[in-house]
Image (tube, coloured by chain):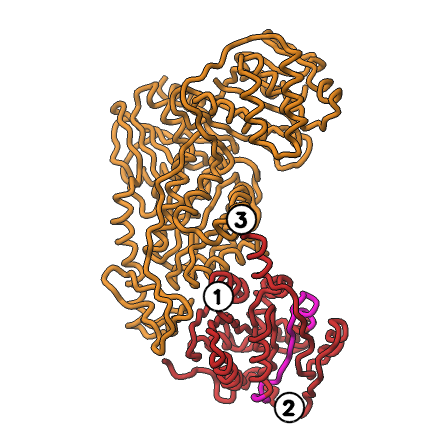
Chain colours: A red, B orange
Amino acid sequence: MDRISWCPGCGNFAILRAFEKASQRVMEEGYDIAVSSGIGCHGKISDYLNLPSFHVTHGRVPPFLTGLKLANPKLIVVGFSGDGDGLNEGAEHLVHAARRNTDITIILHNNGVFGLTTGQVTATSPKGRKSKSTPYGNPEYPINACQLMLASGATFVARVFAREQKKMAEVFYRAMKHRGFSFVEVLQPCVSFNNFWDLRKEVFWVEKAESVYEAMRMCEDIRACGVFYAEEKETYEDAVWKSTF
Amino acid sequence: MNVCIAGAAGDGIRGAGVILGKIFGEFGYSVFVYQEYQSRIRGGHNASVVRASEKEINSHGYYYDALICLRDYVFEKHAERLRGVLICDSSFGLEHEAKVEFPINETVERLNLPDISKNIAAISVFCKSFGIEAEVVKSVVRESLGKSAEEQNIEVVRAVYENLDISVGQIRRVGEGKELVSGAEAIAEGMLDAGLKFYYAYPMTPATPILHVLAADSRCVALQPESEIAAIMMAIGSAFGGERAAVGTSGGGFALMSESISLAGMAEIPVLIILAQRSGPSTGMATFTAQQDLYFALNPAHGEFPLIVASPLTIEDSYRLSGELLNLAWEFQTPAVLLMEKHITESHTTAKLGGVVKREVEIFRERSREVFRRYEITESGVSPYASPPALVKANSNEHDEYGFTTDDAEIAAEMYAKRMRKGEEIAKAVANLEPYVEMRNGKDWIVTWGSNFGAVKEVAEELGYSVAAVRFMRPLFLPKISGEVFCVECNYSGLLSKFLEAEGVKLKRILRWDGRPFTPEEIRREVERWTE
């Protein structure tokens, strides 16, 4: 395997380690896991995990995983996506996968920047941010990924900070074990283009909300972390099997 | 015999054409049904042309032996083609020498039935006038319509048969009953016989009927995702999971799939894409046929990778080729494009489908500690296939034999060449699959591809021309032809013609790009015009 090519100090290392821990735990329980990733720094994680994987194209992880899960319902399938990958190019897929309650887990590496193409703004970059593509400041408002997923019908929505590896591993584990569409946003500092490791002083942990509306309010503050929402609902796969056969 | 049923959208013109086609099939005729309809749900002008012959046919005719009008205003549009009987409501007051009139509207109203029953009434008038027994009509109506519509429509048939006493001809049984199938059904059946498990499609005319057919079939899962991009990505996901998957769309949706076709080429994932052509560019004429996307199908995506493209000649051929392409895609682990036309997917014919079998390929599915050598460099270029839970890594990036990303010049060059070598193996396989059809009738030729074949074959036999019809477009095998050559295509510039010209063949183009398919009469007229 190639040496890991992320920048030293990148938040992706923490995600990799936490996921290794969580996936180990899931596999010890007898499950098989397959993963996929999109395009961007996060996408390289497919190469670094000792798991079946498919490094697909930009933004296309959710439909790919949906097709894989339908073909082999016994697999636990996990997709890695970035803020550019999942919220710019692939937002449509993410919304529909959540809406269907497809039994897949999406881990969104949110570093607020296109890292691998040297630092342009993404859908989560703040308004006014200067970058090579926005020399006069970003004219767009950012999107709140967790709110978007809650509004779309995701049945497990969480946010973690890359600094908190243990908590992150626990949330990844719960997300994988959740039956239905699970979404975990990881606040992942990019040391080269958007370094926010300092956020550690500000992040705070919240308890699960009782309703989607409460969860929406809870995750409005981007520094809020925790499992905001979780509910059981018929999955897409179950509905498909029921109606086809 | 060539019969046209014309009316408005919502009058059940399409259904009437299918029912009449089934009646002719029941009497042992070879039948072709062409559906011409507008992109609207109510009103306007729709037509269904049903042709029946004792000889095997694969086209409809230009002139009508009978015209059934469900609206008065559609007559004008068709009058020029009518060479026989006009069948219509008595109240229309249409001028034509040979006419069978019946109070269709009044009868349907008197029986208190919905307007749509007028189509069954009109067919009954036709059948009674041509000596077909009421029982045949009733049994086909029963079989074709759902339980709820059954009784009332049988009542309509009875009312017409009791009150109409006229004979303008006699349709006789010419052989064993034949079954009527649509192009969409043939394509679906071919894929299912070749092991299709998943079909993903976003609705787009004229590929949508394939989705409808498969959605109602429990042998596979057919789903409608958020976009064509999602559809093909789901298919790639299922194929990575070891199950056969296909997608279907028209030009606009195919454009959206481009990126993922390249991904399937790179990651060596088998996927069958059905491209059902309609008149373009852009939205074009959504419900009209065309052969404009040949070059698009041949070059659908960025980068070089082996691709299989074939275009069937008839509805029956669609069954064979859809199955064949799904098998080939899996044998060579690469995307395949079935290039269809509206004139096939939405037409009907009498055909007996059978013969396609799933050719198994080995898939490694065991858990393992070692990463599977999924992209092993081999002489043929084909590497062993594996699906999770096997430790298999697939990649959109250039990769080594284990699927890990690489930009090493040596590995990249070898891996690229490995993929491309599959193209040579595909060519060897396709050479044995009748890449083009040849029929020798004389020294001069009419060349064509796709659905024109049916009309071309008839004209060539009549005028003494040999026929060559290209089926596989990539790898492309061109027939060796000489003498005077015509090339018939439904596009503006002659896309197949250009390939033949590049081989030094001098030819005369017979083209149309008005969204209408060729009839034998029109091709004959063109050939004669050139030879005058």
Q: Position of residue B186 (x, y in %)?
A: 44, 39
Which amino acid is tagged 1?
A: Thr
Taking the spot 71% from the left edge, 27% from the top edge, the residue there is B115
Residue under label 3: B252
Q: Position of residue B357 (x, y in %)?
A: 35, 46
Q: Is residue B346 magenta?
A: no
Q: Which mark is residue A200?
A: 2
Q: Secondary structure at mark 3?
A: helix
* Disc 1 and disc 3 in contact, CB within 8 angstroms: no
Taking the spot 67% from the left edge, 13% from the top edge, the residue there is B102
Which amino acid is tagged 2?
A: Arg
Q: Position of residue B73 (x, y in %)?
A: 67, 21
Q: Tell me where the magenta segment starts and ends, as one range.
A: A147-166
Q: Position of residue B79 (x, y in %)?
A: 59, 16
Residue B98 against residue B316 in the figure, above or below: above
Residue at the left extreme, as displayed:
B379
Q: Which mark is residue A57?
A: 1
Residue A135 against residue B532 in the figure, above or below: below
Badge 3 density bin: few <14, some 14–19, many ≥20, Cα 10 Å: some
Q: Nearer the viewer, residue A80 or B129?
A: B129
Which quarter of the figure has residue A186?
A: bottom right
Residue A188 against residue A39 in the figure, above or below: below
Horizontal side of residue B165 vs B65, given as left or right? right
Query: Do marks 1 and 3 share a subunit?
Result: no
Quadrant, the C terminus of chain B: top left
Query: Do marks 2 and 1 share a subunit?
Result: yes
